[in-house]
Image: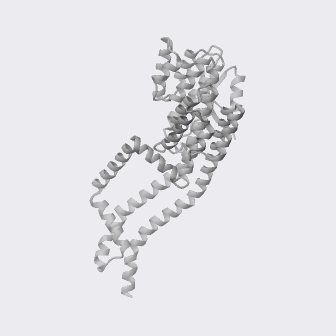
Amino acid sequence: MSTIFDYRAIDQSGELQTGFLPGESAEAVAERVRRMGLRPVSVSPKRAQFAQKELSIPGFNGKKIEALSLFSRQFATMTAAGTPIVRCLKVLEAQTEHKGFKGAIKMIRGDIENGDQLSDAMVRQTEWFSDFYISMVRAGESAGSLPLVLERLAHATESQARLRKKVKSAMAYPTAVGFLIICCVLAMLMFLIPTFAGIFKDLGGELPLPTRIVMGVSGLLTNYFPFVFLGTGLAIWRFRKWKKSESGRLTWDTFKLRLPVFGKLARLTALARFSQSLSVLVSTGVPAVSALEIAKGTAGNDFVAQNVAEIARVVSAGGTLSGAMAEQPVFTEMVVQMVGVGEESGDLDGMLDKVAEMYELEVNSTVEALTSLLEPLLIVAMGVTVGGILMSVYLPMFKAISLVK
């Protein structure tokens, strides 16, 4: 079955051309674009309608990652073809859909036209470009291999985008079902339970404990809803503020790694990002200690970053990378051995790349296992929650019927 693909390509005069074509795959459409006399910059499936869009989960800044990934791939493609950097940025600015990123690219282009290096211009746009990204670009400029570095950056950002999608797919189902459970419970407590209050009062006698608990919670919600709403909002705001603090972030990231099932997914994702970034940095000639200091920020987890900082300290004192990794609890013995082999063979960046691929494969398998495990568990949880509330409502009625008989 054919899919509609959006394409962006450069014609012989250097102008950006856009359009859409049907095809079996992105590669097939790219080949059709080449036969039209154009040089393809990007080919992607046509954006889905609203009902087909993926669920957006708070905490995952997906639009930025996807915009940066697309920018990196297109930038690498154009520089490899010999297009001047200013011309590349002009084309990328025109085709970028994210308004904030469009403005950042425009400012970078202006700085370069005023005589700045690309890396120096990116330093002023830290909202979009991390220390890792800027260091890579600076290394490419120094070595005269910017197109090659941009190609590796494109691969790294695409890998991060894939990881994000995997984690997002794992979280989408429990988030949706959890939201549905909360809505059902709130509706029952605020609208269904109060209708039974008068009936229970007429029955007289002492209500069962589950019924008293449900009635108490229902009364609290219906009588003090504004205060409950404000209190919940204040608690969420306070938690988010605490999580942004240095101690809170470390505590929260450590807690996430200890969660059953989800903890493993968080650890694998952080290590895959770190390994990929370290591999790219080492391959471009960045010194090991500097590469570790830069790559630790890409892990996205303060506990893992703390482990990497300790590894950097040991390496700077003359220790080996594999030996330092063996002392940290987040790295498995297999990974330590693989890094050791890379050090001995002189192919450390290649081995780190294999480590990143291994972690990404583990993320895929963990997501599949998590999805298959959570679906029945969440259905059971929803049934138990809703059924428990209904049972607490009907218990007094069963008791009244038995007394009548």
Residue sitting nearer the eye, 319 or 204: 319
Tell me if I can see residue 18 in this picture: no
Q: Residue, x 58% and y 54% (percent of image)? A: 370
- Between residue 198 and residue 390, name the one nearer to us: 390
- Residue under the point 56% across and 54% down: 261
In percent of width and height, residue 47 lies at 57, 36
Question: Where's the N terminus, which quadrant?
Answer: top right
Colour setting? one colour
Left or right: where does residue 402 sit relative to residue 122?
left
On the image, the x and y values in percent for residue 327 come to 57, 44
At x 51% / y 53%, what residue is drawn?
259
Q: Is residue 299 above or below residue 92?
A: below
**Residue 105 picture location, percent across and down:** 50, 22
Q: Is residue 195 above or below residue 121?
A: below
Left or right? Give the position of 305 relative to 278. left
| Residue 180 location (% of width, % of height) | 46, 56
**Is 224 in front, or is 339?**
339
Point 62% across, 54% down: residue: 369
Quarter that holds the C terminus: bottom left
